[in-house]
Amino acid sequence: MNPVLTIVLGITLLTVVGIAFGGTFLLRVGNGTVPANDLQKTFFRAGHAHAGVLVTLGLLVAVLTHVAGASPDWGTAGAVAVLLAAIFVPAGFFLSVLGPDPQRPGPMIASVWIGAATLVAGLVISGVSVLAAGLAAV
């Protein structure tokens, strides 16, 4: 595995602690300890869920491209793109509803769309590199 990717994956595993801590924040929002309107509650849940799912997907993509024998450079690029999406998408959900009582998402909602584009790019890169490795092995 590419050493840079190995370092990124180690850092990513450590970020799961932050995602778990985010779950305690959601519990405080849910029980009313942290005041939040309905929009904020919805966006906070979406941000937390996307963080967990996209980090898991990024780790899976990294291992899958490595095990499949995909090009190390392309495998790294695809996995890192998926992991970047795990930053952009949740950040957009959380940061677009900051404030005491937002009625609609703010400009940071653009981060969700940037993350979606990054996710698609990472999955296409990874999918094509795994497919190419498989075809080369036939």
Image (cartoon, rainbow, N blue to C red):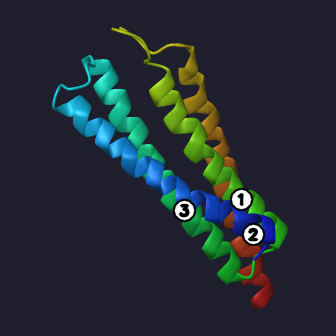
In the image, is 89 to the left or to the right of 72? Answer: left
Q: Amino acid at mark 1?
A: Gly
Q: Earlier in the sequence, mark 3 or mark 1?
A: 3
Quadrant assignment, res 122: bottom right
Give the secondary structure at mark 2.
helix
Q: Which residue is mark 1?
A: 78
Q: Earlier in the sequence, mark 2 or mark 3?
A: 3
* Figure check: 98 above or below 13: above
Q: Earlier in the sequence, mark 1 or mark 2?
A: 1
- Image quarter (top left, top right, bottom left or bottom right) of the N terminus: bottom right
In the image, is 130 to the left or to the right of 24? Answer: right
Q: Amino acid at mark 2?
A: Ser
* Figure check: 130 above or below 134: above
Marks 1, 2: nearer the viewer: 1
Q: Amino acid at mark 3?
A: Leu
The answer to whether one can see residue 71 in this image is yes
Crowd class of label 2 (few under 14; some 14 to 19; many from 20; radius 10 Å): many
